[in-house]
Image (cartoon, rainbow, N blue to C red):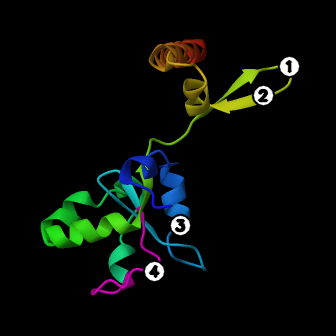
Amino acid sequence: MELNENSLLNQRYYPRDIMINNGKNGKPLWIVIHNKVYDVTNFNHPGGKDVFHSMDEDDLDKGDEFDSIHSKATKKTAKTYLIGKLVAEEKTIKINKDNNEIKSVNEIIESSNGSGKLMLFVLIVILILVIILAKSSHN
């Protein structure tokens, strides 16, 4: 079964996933172009694999560089290596102090059945209040 681009974009990866899958020590080599993640482990780049090793966590997305030097045909070929999309780093929060349940913010949003934006807003407000209270208690 061949997957289309939309179904592949349902697969989400975090910056730490890209940094781990850096092509070193037997790991696959993943890159990010316009927030889309590509597995280029088996791609033979004309410039060699070294062109992919110039990433750092603060500058993972190489979309502008890619666009500036690649043709439309190359951009079309790149789609065959697409494996998912890059999302913001997953944050975790403690949900239930009795059983030490820890969930990521993304898990909470996904399980909220459409009220994800409201839930995210509430979490952000709570986080801001915690930070304000922590700072004021230190003064």
Provide the residue designation for mark 2. Answer: 101
Task: Please indicate, yes or no, whether residue 50 appears anywhere in the rendered image.
Answer: yes
Q: Is residue 4 above or below residue 92?
A: below
Q: CA distance from mark 3 to mark 1?
A: 36 Å
* Picture residue at 68% right of the left edge, 31% below the top: 103
| Residue neighbourhood size for the residue with mark 3, other residues' Cα within 10 Å, grouped as few (<14), some (14–19), many (≥20) | some
Looking at the rendered structure, which numbered label has been put on residue 98? 1
First in residue order: circle 3 vs circle 4: 3
Q: Nearer the viewer, mark 3 or mark 4?
A: 4
Q: CA distance from mark 1 to mark 2?
A: 8 Å
First in residue order: circle 1 vs circle 4: 4
Secondary element type, mark 2: strand
Provide the residue designation for mark 4. Answer: 42
Badge 4 amino acid: Asn
* Picture residue at 56% right of the left edge, 12% below the top: 133
User: In this picture, which residue range is highlighted in magenta?
Assistant: 38-49
Badge 1 amino acid: Asp
Q: CA distance from mark 3 to mark 2?
A: 28 Å
Expressed as whole percent of the image width and height from the top left, the position of residue 97 reads 80, 20
Badge 3 amino acid: Asn
Provide the residue designation for mark 3. Answer: 21
Q: Are marks 1 and 2 in contact (CB under 8 Å)?
A: no
Q: CA distance from mark 1 to mark 4?
A: 47 Å
